[in-house]
Amino acid sequence: MIKYSSGLLDFHTHSTFSDGSLTPSQLVSEAKKTGVSAMALTDHNTISGLEEFQAACRKEDVFPIPLGVEIYAELPSEIVTPEDNRAPDLVILGKNVNPKPLYDYEQNLLKYFREVFLFESVRKLEVLGFKFPREKVREQYEILQRELQSPPKILHDFIGLPGNREVFLRYLQEHEINDEIAGREISFMNKYLFAIGRPAYVDRISGFNVSDAIVLAHNMNGKLFVAHPGGRFFGALRPEIIDYYVQAGIDGLEVRNYFNSNEQNSNFDELARKHGLIRSGGSDYHGANGISKIGIYDVPDNQVPKEVLEELVDNLPN
Ligand SMILES: [Zn+2]
């Protein structure tokens, strides 16, 4: 273990199995090249990439967290405000891959995306002037008969259609949003279009709350972590929301993340200590589909502390 904590630690990454641009094998090679020595693959709502991920880690001599997946949940409507910006992203990490409990979650999500999310999103985006050829929507509907696509992937695929980027840039201009990142990076449309209270926001999940997510994680022999609590570009989680997670019985917190700022990091360490939460963290790397860099979190001291590897692994159930 000591050997693996000598490099960078990255327990939040995405591959082509959700909305990342690299396959798990490419992701691990890239990580290795950058100096990552231990990592987790945490694709949205799926563990299908884990087999390839683990094989690649063995080949590259990178320590893998065997189970990793990022899931959605709902917050109680009485505590959410438009300022909260994003519904919960929660990461499950574990020592063993136990896929069965995830199956119902995936099937319900698949049905919800196909029957509600897809059409609601298209309807709201069309009101804003985005255009979607019917066959493209049908194609997406058909994919959703068979396999789960992450909402970011569905929406970014649509927004990426010819002409739609211009609609988005015009939208920024009309609303006097002067944000260089938003114009440059497709994933930052999240902030202006798809966040809570924004014009194209549609719930990403229905009837599945944080307590359900905790039960799911534990049934998978994993622990549940709050992802990117900092929200450097989106707005940080309000203390009330963090309190809610703690009271619900969340297991851990990403004390480091590309989206955390430096001063937040020491607060998160403190918060984890105070509430007995397991520390984790990562880059939230999406390859070319995002802005973060693997293993490196571009504000100073924003790397997962070396001691977290042992702390994390020791605290994951067998
Ligand atoms: Zn993520």
Image (cartoon, rainbow, N blue to C red):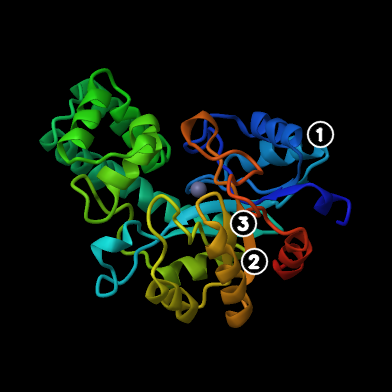
Q: Return the residue found at the far left.
A: 127
- Check the image and report above or below for 9 versus 265: above
Of tags 1 and 3, the one toward the viewer is: 3
The residue sitting at 60% across, 30% down in the picture is 23
Q: Which residue is mark 2?
A: 279
Q: Is residue 298 left or right of residue 307?
A: left
What amino acid is labelled 3 in the image?
Gly
Give the distance between the C-alpha atoms of the residues marked 2 and 1, in whole angstroms: 27 Å
Q: Residues within 10 Å of mark 1 (few under 14, many from 20)?
A: few
Whichever of callouts 2 and 1 sits on the residue coming sooner in the sequence is 1
- Check the image and report above or below for 48 versus 134: below
Residue 59 disc label: 1
The residue sitting at 66% across, 54% down in the picture is 301
Whichever of callouts 1 and 3 sits on the residue coming sooner in the sequence is 1
Give the distance between the C-alpha atoms of the residues marked 3 and 2, in whole angstroms: 7 Å
Cβ atoms under marks 1 and 3 closer than 8 Å: no
Q: Quadrant of the C terminus?
A: bottom right
Give the camera-side residue of 132 and 184: 184
- Check the image and report above or below for 171 versus 250: above
The residue sitting at 36% across, 64% down in the picture is 208
SS assignment at label 3? strand
**Whether residue 295 can be seen here:** yes
Q: Which residue is mark 3?
A: 281
Cβ atoms under marks 3 and 2 closer than 8 Å: yes
Give the camera-side residue of 81 and 169: 169
Where residue 221 appears, x then y in whole percent? 64, 65
Give the distance between the C-alpha atoms of the residues marked 1 and 3, in whole angstroms: 24 Å
The residue sitting at 49% across, 38% down in the picture is 18
SS assignment at label 1? helix
Where residue 280 appears, x then y in whole percent? 64, 61
Where residue 269 appears, x then y in whole percent? 62, 70
